């Protein structure tokens, strides 16, 4: 997954990184890898921080719409650019805004596309959870994800309701291990 993500970042880096005079050519690869790492670490932190509904919703929607996770990854990458590349805040935000949202939206779109196997949603979640989701059918979770309790929003209560009931106990047991 990381290799495919880095390739996607390279595709989107263009003028923002590769042709940017503020980033020395010998540091282009590092800047590209940092973008991929910022995306992965942001998604990992979101899952470990209990924001599974945000991550599932993001991938369910194929990356469309505004998303706090994308904003967070963009900010993390901008911070990395300031720290590691010496860019000022304005330059760093400009680069990050040109690279991260487009890359993440393409990744989510590819993950949602059954005809594109470059980003498999199960593989993504297995990588992000360090293998803890290997027993879960993440695609089925995404397909069922939505406002299950009818309160007008999608939250942890909706996720809990997906696992309630008689036949879901084995899946619920596996999910408990993932969330703990």
Image: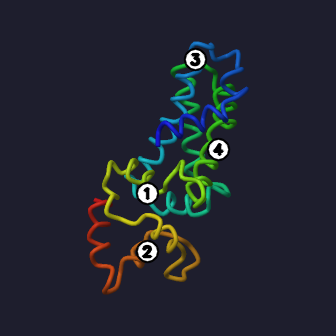
Q: Secondary structure at mark 2?
A: helix
Residue sitting at x 51%, y 29%: 33
State how far apart marks 4 and 1 are (Cα): 21 Å
The label shown at residue 122 is: 1
State how far apart marks 2 and 4 are (Cα): 28 Å
Q: Secondary structure at mark 4?
A: helix
Front residue of 50/110: it is 110
* Mark earlier in primary sequence (2, 4): 4
For label 3, the residue is: 86
Q: Give x and y (percent) for residue 108.
A: 58, 53
Front residue of 120/133: it is 120
Q: Give x and y (percent) for residue 146.
A: 54, 73
* Mark earlier in primary sequence (4, 3): 3
* Mark earlier in primary sequence (3, 1): 3
Q: Is residue 1 left or right of residue 171?
A: right
State how far apart marks 3 and 1 are (Cα): 36 Å
Q: Give x and y (percent) for residue 5.
A: 53, 40
Q: Is residue 120 above or below residue 101?
A: below
Residue sitting at x 55%, y 55%: 111
For label 2, the residue is: 157
Q: Secondary structure at mark 1?
A: helix
Q: Is residue 55 left or right of residue 24?
A: left
Q: Quadrant of residue 61?
A: bottom right
State how far apart marks 3 and 2 are (Cα): 43 Å
Marks 4, 1: nearer the viewer: 1
Q: Which quadrant does the C terminus fall into?
A: bottom left
State how far apart marks 1 and 2 are (Cα): 23 Å
Tell me, yes or no, whether the two marked residues, 3 and 2, touch with CB atoms within 8 Å: no
For label 4, the residue is: 101
């Amino acid at each position: 997954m990381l290799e495919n993500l880095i390739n996607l970042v390279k595709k989107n880096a263009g003028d923002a990184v590769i042709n940017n005079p503020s980033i020395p050519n010998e540091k282009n690869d590092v800047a590209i890898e940092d973008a991929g790492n910022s995306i992965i670490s942001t998604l990992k932190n979101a899952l470990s921080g209990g924001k599974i509904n945000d991550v599932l919703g993001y991938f369910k929607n194929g990356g469309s719409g505004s998303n706090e996770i994308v904003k967070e990854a963009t900010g993390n990458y901008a911070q990395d650019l300031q720290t590691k590349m010496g860019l000022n805040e304005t330059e760093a935000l400009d680069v990050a805004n040109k690279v991260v949202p487009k890359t993440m939206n393409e990744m989510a779109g590819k993950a949602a596309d059954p005809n594109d196997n470059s980003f498999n949603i199960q593989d993504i979640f297995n990588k992000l959870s360090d293998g803890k989701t290997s027993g879960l059918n993440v695609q089925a979770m995404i397909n069922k994800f939505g406002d299950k309790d009818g309160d007008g929003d999608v939250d942890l209560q909706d996720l809990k309701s997906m696992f309630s009931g008689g036949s879901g106990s084995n899946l619920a047991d596996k999910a408990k291990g993932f969330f703990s």
